[in-house]
Image (cartoon, rainbow, N blue to C red):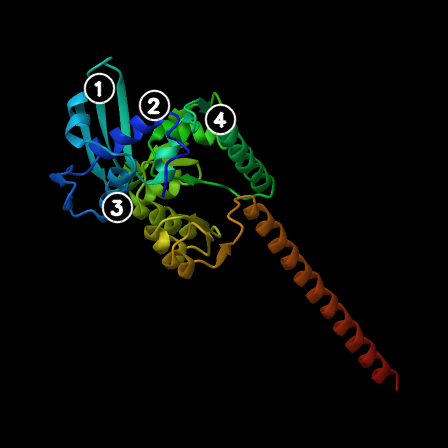
Amino acid sequence: MKIAFIASCMTVVELIQQGVTLNTTRGVYQYQRTTGSDFENNYTEKAIKSWALKELNIDMDELRGKCTVLQAKAYHSLKKRNGILMRKKTDHTLHMHWNGEGETNLAMCSNYYTASGIIRPLDKLVRKIIQGVRNVVNCCQHAGVKIKMITIINISAAKMIATECGKLRPNQDMSSGEVIQGEEFRRYTQEERMMKLEKIHVMASSSPSDKLLMVICAKQKGHVVAVTGNETEDAVALKEADIGLSVGIEATEVEKESSDIVILDDNFDSVATIISWGRCVYNNIQKFIQFQLTVNVAARVQLYCHSFHW
């Protein structure tokens, strides 16, 4: 893999070098160009560093001497990332490097570098995605489907996303229980969960067990529950729900096996289509049964009347 497409911008190359060198689990213990590298037992980091050392010509010691690591965040199993806050010794600029799940890191970003080093906003792409989700939310609400957002992200980001998607009003009062955290939901008694279930619109900082608990409570309340998930840990909630939905490309095999419906086009807009088609089929079956019953009853009444006449 060559990096000729970014070699024209040293800013981009330098940022990649910093991230590869400094933002690691335990760092590189030893590097010898003749015998190779002695990395920590993390094969993903080993592959990335091996590529970077060969393609970017990184001098580990020199790069570490140019920067000071101010703070390091250890890997978090729920947030699925680790990171460092560093400062360059030359101009004292600060950089935050994150290492982890792509979707989680991308959700924190507002801009990106092009190959030539130009900073451009991610807003257009995000707006397009959010608009699609907003349309689905509106369609579901008009169809009488109640949507609850259960996410691992923090409560501030969850509020912002829910507002952008049309799930919350911009000036909505948050003190009435529409937005809670997973830990708060776990602390409720069974009676409190059943009483507050209908009010909850967003549950942030949630674990897979919180999602499962929400599904169980909704079913006990008498609702027909559909669940979407994109993690292996969501398999239990998908299995417990009346309808499990998974996204084709992003879903794991465990998740697909636990789902009733797999969305092959990776488009959340398909949820509205699934609801529309499902209800159409259901209504057609009802009409067919009604038609058959009417015809059969009318035929039998006519037969009995004819027999009685004779």
Q: Is residue 125 visible to the viewer in this orientation of the structure?
A: yes
Q: Which numbered circle lies on residue 47?
A: 3
Mark 4–mark 3 distance (CA, rounded to whole Å)? 32 Å
Residue type, mark 1 in image = Arg
CA neighbours of label 1 inside 10 A, class few (<14), some (14 to 19), many (20+): some
Q: Is residue 67 visible to the viewer in this orientation of the structure?
A: no
Choose top left, top right, bottom left or bottom right for residue 191.
top left
User: What is the x, y in percent for residue 55?
Assistant: 30, 38
Say which label, 4 or 3, has the lower sequence index: 3
Mark 2–mark 3 distance (CA, rounded to whole Å)? 23 Å
Mark 4–mark 2 distance (CA, rounded to whole Å)? 22 Å
Q: Residue furthest front?
A: 34
Q: Quadrant of the C terminus?
A: bottom right
Q: Residue furthest left?
A: 29
Residue type, mark 2 in image = Thr
Q: Which numbered circle lies on residue 123?
A: 4
Q: Residue at x 30, y 43 (%)?
A: 207
Say which label, 4 or 1, has the lower sequence index: 1
